[in-house]
Image (cartoon, grey):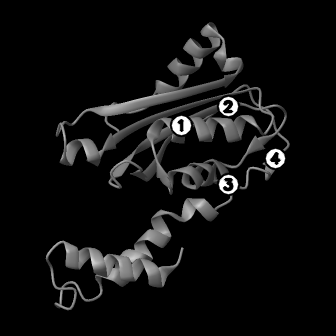
Amino acid sequence: MDEERVKKLVRELIIELGEDPTREGLRETPERIANMYKEIFGGYDSDSELSVQFSEDSDVVIARNIQFYSMCEHHMLPFYGKIHIAYSPNGRVFGISKLVRLVEKYSKRLQIQERLTKNIADELNAQGVNGVVVLVDAEHLCMKMRGVKNDAMLSSSAFRGIYENKEEKAAIMTQIRKNTTDSYF
């Protein structure tokens, strides 16, 4: 990202909105926005580090309530929530921090929730696990602040490997939702 260009564009936007970019409250805004964008869109340059695994086995590993923040690619407004990941290892397990990094890799981009869900499941599945489930529950400010102005939440899911089987899917969904709070925020 070219930070100087972003600063210039933000300054121009401030002018287009009818504001004075030299007034006290706005003087540092272009720099603050450029720094913020560098952080919240850092997923384009990140590595989930899934290659770091440990020789252990388990029937299923579940990471619940991984908090995420992302930006809707349609309106550039935030959506945020919790991601639940379950996978069936194939002799090797991932550290929990690797699952969080995987979530950050895809959430810190211009994104839609459905693609975020699929990207996480696909990358984890590509590591040779027996199966993967990714559930995402999120609130979208583009829907709350504009348009229909509704508090509805969106849930999306992706199933790979053994969890594409109807019985396995039902069993793992029960396990994931067990001890998961109804209110994610």
The residue depicted at 77 percent of the width and 26 percent of the height is 130
According to the image, label 2 marks what residue?
A: 87
According to the image, label 3 marks what residue?
A: 48
How far is mark 3 from mark 1, CA to CA?
15 Å
- Helix, strand or loop status at disc 4: strand
Labels 3 & 1 near each other (Cβ < 8 A):
no
In this view, 95 is above or below 133: below
Q: Position of residue 47 (x, y in %)?
A: 68, 59
Mark toward the viewer: 3 or 4 = 3
Q: Is residue 185 visible?
A: no
Labels 2 & 1 near each other (Cβ < 8 A):
no
According to the image, label 1 marks what residue?
A: 117
The residue depicted at 65 percent of the width and 16 percent of the height is 164
Labels 1 & 4 near each other (Cβ < 8 A):
no
- Helix, strand or loop status at disc 3: loop
Mark toward the viewer: 2 or 1 = 1
Return the residue found at the far left.
18
How far is mark 1 from mark 4, CA to CA?
25 Å
Is disc 1 surrounded by few (<14), some (14 to 19) or many (20+) residues within 10 Å? Answer: many
How far is mark 2 from mark 3, CA to CA?
16 Å
Q: Earlier in the sequence, mark 3 or mark 4?
A: 3
- Kind of residue indicated by mark 4: Phe
Q: Earlier in the sequence, mark 2 or mark 1?
A: 2
Q: Position of residue 141 (x, y in %)?
A: 27, 48
How far is mark 4 from mark 2, CA to CA?
14 Å
- Helix, strand or loop status at disc 1: helix
Mark toward the viewer: 4 or 2 = 2
Q: Position of residue 181 (x, y in %)?
A: 37, 33
